[in-house]
Each structure stands twice: as C-alpha cells, then as structure tokens.
Amino acid sequence: MDIGLAILMFIAVILFMIYLSTRSIVEAINHWGAAHESYQLKIIKELREPGPNRIWFLGDAFRLGLSIEEIFQHSKIDPWFLYQIKDLIEIEEKTKKMTIKSFSSEILFDIKRKGFSDSRIAKLVKKKTKDIRTLRYKHKIHPVYKRVDTCAAEFEATSTYLYSTYEKVCESNASNNKKIIRLI
C-alpha cells in the first residue's frame, strides 16, 4: 500500500483500494445522472447520514457545485478534509480536459504524487493504461521507496519498512543482503 506523503495521495489510494476499480467518486454511485432532479436531494440525504458510501457522495456534491460550507452544513465533516476531497475532484476535472500529448513531465508527476493510478489517468483522458505507463516511463517517472520509522525516533530501528510513492528522493538504500517482502 502506498502510504504517501500527502493526504491527497493517501485518500486517493485508500479510495482506490476500497473500490478496487478505476471508477471515480461520482461514477461509483451515480445511477441517475447529474441532471436528474432528485439527484441533489439524494446526495444531501446521503451526506447527512454517515454510512459506507458517504465518501462517494462527497465527490458527487462537489461535482454538482455544492460549496465546502454547504457540504459541511449537511455532513459535519471537518472542512480540512472537505478541501482535500475537493482538490482530488478538481484534479480529475482538469485531467479530463487534457490530452495525452499535453502531459508534461511535471504535470504527470504531480498527478501521480496525488495518488492517481495509471489506469485512472488513462480513463480520464480516454486512453489505455499502457499508454499512460509508456508516457510515464518516457518521462522517467517511477515510484521511489520511503522508510517508515517504526520506532518513532525513540531509538534506531533494526528492521525497515518501506512504502512506494512518487517523490524525488528514494530512501531504500538497497544492499546485496538477503531481502524479505511483506505483503499486507
């Protein structure tokens, strides 16, 4: 699992793991279509009642143009978290307007840093996952590994846990020693 250094990456990766697909927040629940009159009422009802699908309705609420204040009034979710979700939705919307040729190295790296998978980016720009992966390789954008401080800096850790993320500096310090991989 990618732990990520930014909350956006954490949220995007967790949502992807929960849903196990390349669907966006709005695509997960949108049965009626945004133009349907009762859709906004359905979203507001779902925001007011905590439940397993409420996170998906948050995305729908932003896509329909509800403000952070309006969503807060209905959901009582801390505005800081709402800003994070809104940022993910805005990144999706901007990415949808792009073509694969308009991705610079910096733009693609930034989207990957925010936790978007190659398959999600591909779906947003209506391309195949392998096209995004090829572009990522062309721009030399690869995951790096960061260390988890399992001892909370109280003393030096003898066993290191690593997670992959999209950053500039790799902390893996690879050696020729025997390795162990734990899949969680």
Image (cartoon, rainbow, N blue to C red):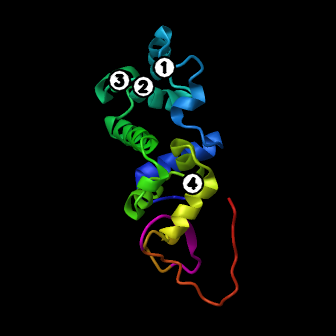
Q: CA distance from mark 3 to mark 4?
A: 29 Å
Q: CA distance from mark 3 to mark 1?
A: 13 Å
Which dot marks residue 80? Answer: none
Instruction: Tell me which residue sits at (56%, 70%) in the image.
Output: 162
User: Which badge, 4 or 2, comes first in the chain's sequence?
Assistant: 2
In this view, the residue in front, 83 or 21, is 21
User: Which badge, 3 or 4, comes first in the chain's sequence?
Assistant: 3
Q: Amino acid at mark 2?
A: Ala
Q: For mark 1, does the 10 Å Cα neighbourhood hold few (<14), some (14 to 19), or many (20 or more) residues?
A: some
Secondary structure beneath dot 2 equals: helix
User: Which badge, 3 or 1, comes first in the chain's sequence?
Assistant: 1
Residue identified by numbered label 3: 66
Above or below: residue 30 compared with residue 36: below
Residue identified by numbered label 2: 61
In this view, the residue in front, 23 or 164, is 23
Tell me whether circle 3 and circle 1 mark residues in contact (CB < 8 Å): no
Q: Amino acid at mark 4?
A: Asp
In this view, the residue in front, 102 or 58, is 102
Residue identified by numbered label 1: 34
Left or right: where does residue 44 sit relative to residue 150?
Answer: left
Tell me whether circle 2 and circle 3 mark residues in contact (CB < 8 Å): yes
Q: Amino acid at mark 1?
A: Ala
